[in-house]
């Protein structure tokens, strides 16, 4: 994260707090969240997208404290489950500032969202339209909705996190006319207020041309709904997915660059279509929380493994792994890392940092140069683990999920505590 610095002894400090000091209290592995950095990123998006709405995609990472920061910074927040909704409300996010996503929201979840007056429900199927219609007629309450559309864009990212091509589960296709039909159905449903179209093309995207193509297609449908169905939708959403730097190779765009690019295309297309510009919204998750967190591990074992051809790879095992960061195993994601607890003048060796789980794919950092004297007891920090780290953590091998420690001005505060054996075995009904 941006306030991370090493002192003369090679000790890494985040938010003015030395990681060895922090770890002395909370142990490892631990996620360390730099509060100022998180708030600054949230604010950067809000300022760059002034005149638009920024929804923090809470699936990237959510806890009550973070929901509170989002509310304090004046952003909106996107949820995709009933429990995420509860946490958002607990953090003081106003229901009107909440967006609700999901391709299979239950009738119970939808009823709660409508009853609370959630700002927008992003509708994803005809079944859901039926459910919302029933809830509106039953409760007499209005439902504010957007239509999740599939813009048919090939986002250049990992297949599992690309969402706008046609053959996947999300949204209504623009190309086949399903999205238009959804608009027709919603406009014929009493109590429904159709706010706009919503497109999310994928995640960890650097090439922004995908957003431009999506915006063009969304606005063309937007104009068609206005012309043929007589309803001018006040909003549009272009989703999240903005890439961040995990390694030195990545070259992320700033919020300012993203905002300028999106504005330009929206203004241009609306002019060409002869329509008023709808209010824009976006949903960054990773780009806000990703870089503001790192994970600290303790080295447990160091092993030299001879490769074909005689080269040697140093395997450094740490006290976590795929249970606290599934992304390398799931997406072949690259991370970097650094020795965080001391200075070393030892010549660097090519190392692979691995976890302690029973799988060879349990990789933390695939390739990194670490000092050749790396040894048990050293601390290693992996930057940019804030997004989809803790939120996709598991209890594989009965691992206890690590705490999240917020640091600021040299102070540390546990905002999510470490799981305990009692937490974990509490669900095991065979324990006597
Ligand atoms: N909006 C919608 C509708 C989404 O589905 C997502 C992510 C976002 C916004 C936020 O995307 P972001 O700005 O964080 O990239 N677990 C994967 C990524 C899947 C994201 C799913 N949806 C990962 O670890 O890379």
Image (tube, grey):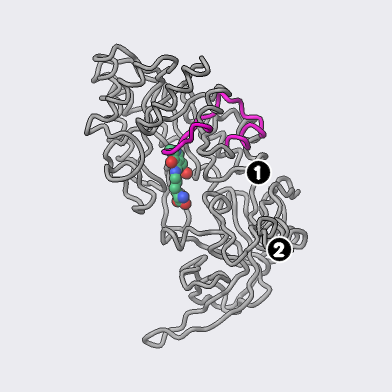
Specify few, some or many for label 1: CA neighbours under 10 Å numbering under 14, 14-19, or 20 or more: many
State the SS at label 2: loop
Q: Residue at x 53, y 27 (%)?
A: 111
Residue 374 in view (yes/no): yes
Left-right relation of 52 to 423: left
Choose between 429 and 294: the one closer to the eye: 429
Choose between 206 and 150: the one closer to the eye: 150
Residue 159 sits above or below residue 164 on the image: below
Q: State the mark number for residue 23.
A: none
Location of residue 87 by image quarter: top right
The percent position of residue 98, horizontal first and vertical second, equals: 54, 29
Q: Residue at x 74, y 48 (%)?
A: 413
Q: Which residue was labeled with disc 2? A: 431
Residue numbers of the magenta segment: 85-109
Residue 34 magenta? no
Residue 363 sits above or below residue 119 on the image: below
Specify few, some or many for label 2: CA neighbours under 10 Å numbering under 14, 14-19, or 20 or more: few
Of pointers 1 and 2, the one earlier in the residue sequence: 1
The percent position of residue 89, horizontal first and vertical second, equals: 63, 31
Q: Which residue was labeled with disc 1? A: 35
Residue 319 sits above or below residue 87 on the image: below
Residue 240 in view (yes/no): no
Residue 30 sits above or below residue 162 on the image: below
Point out the quarter of the image occupied by ligand 1. Answer: top left
State the SS at label 1: helix
Looking at this rendering, what residue extends furthest in the top direction?
230
- Kindly indicate whether the residue at mark 2 contacts the one at mark 1 (C-beta within 8 angstroms): no
Left-right relation of 226 to 50: left
Q: Quadrant of the C terminus?
A: bottom right
């Amino acid at each position: 994260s941006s306030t991370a610095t090493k002192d003369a002894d090679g000790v890494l400090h985040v938010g003015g707090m030395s990681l060895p000091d922090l770890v002395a209290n909370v142990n490892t592995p631990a996620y360390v969240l730099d509060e100022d950095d998180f708030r600054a990123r949230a604010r950067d998006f809000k300022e760059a997208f002034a005149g638009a709405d920024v929804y923090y995609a809470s699936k990237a990472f959510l806890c009550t404290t973070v929901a509170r920061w989002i509310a304090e910074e004046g952003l909106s927040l996107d949820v995709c489950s009933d429990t995420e909704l509860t946490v958002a409300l607990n953090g003081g996010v106003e229901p009107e500032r909440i967006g609700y996503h999901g391709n299979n929201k239950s009738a119970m979840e939808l009823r709660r969202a409508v009853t609370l007056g959630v700002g927008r429900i992003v509708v994803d199927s005809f079944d859901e339209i039926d459910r919302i219609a029933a809830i509106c007629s039953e409760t007499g309450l209005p439902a504010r909705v957007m239509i999740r559309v599939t813009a048919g864009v090939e986002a250049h990212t990992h297949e599992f996190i690309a969402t706008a091509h046609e053959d996947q589960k999300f949204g209504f296709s623009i190309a086949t006319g399903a999205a238009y039909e959804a608009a027709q159905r919603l406009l014929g449903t009493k109590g429904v207020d159709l706010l706009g179209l919503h497109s999310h093309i994928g995640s960890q995207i650097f090439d922004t041309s995908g957003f431009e193509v999506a915006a063009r297609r969304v606005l063309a449908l937007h104009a068609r709904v206005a012309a043929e169905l007589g309803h001018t939708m006040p909003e549009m959403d272009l989703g999240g997915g903005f890439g961040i730097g995990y390694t030195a190779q990545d070259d992320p765009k700033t919020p300012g660059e993203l905002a300028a690019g999106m504005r330009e295309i929206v203004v241009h297309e609306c002019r060409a279509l002869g329509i008023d510009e709808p209010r824009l919204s976006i949903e960054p998750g990773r780009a806000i929380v990703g870089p503001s967190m790192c994970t600290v591990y303790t080295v447990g074992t160091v092993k030299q493994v001879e490769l074909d051809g005689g080269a040697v790879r140093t395997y450094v095992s740490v006290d976590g792994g795929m249970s606290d960061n599934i992304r390398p195993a799931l997406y072949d994601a690259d991370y970097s890392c650094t020795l965080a607890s001391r200075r070393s003048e030892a010549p660097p060796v090519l190392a692979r940092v691995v976890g302690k789980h029973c799988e060879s794919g349990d990789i933390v950092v695939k390739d990194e140069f670490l000092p050749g004297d790396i040894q048990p007891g050293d601390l290693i920090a992996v930057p940019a683990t804030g997004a989809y780290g803790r939120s996709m953590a598991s209890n594989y091998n009965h691992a206890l999920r690590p705490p999240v420690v917020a640091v600021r001005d040299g102070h540390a505060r546990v905002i999510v505590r470490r799981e305990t054996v009692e937490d974990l075995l509490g669900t095991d009904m065979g324990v006597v």
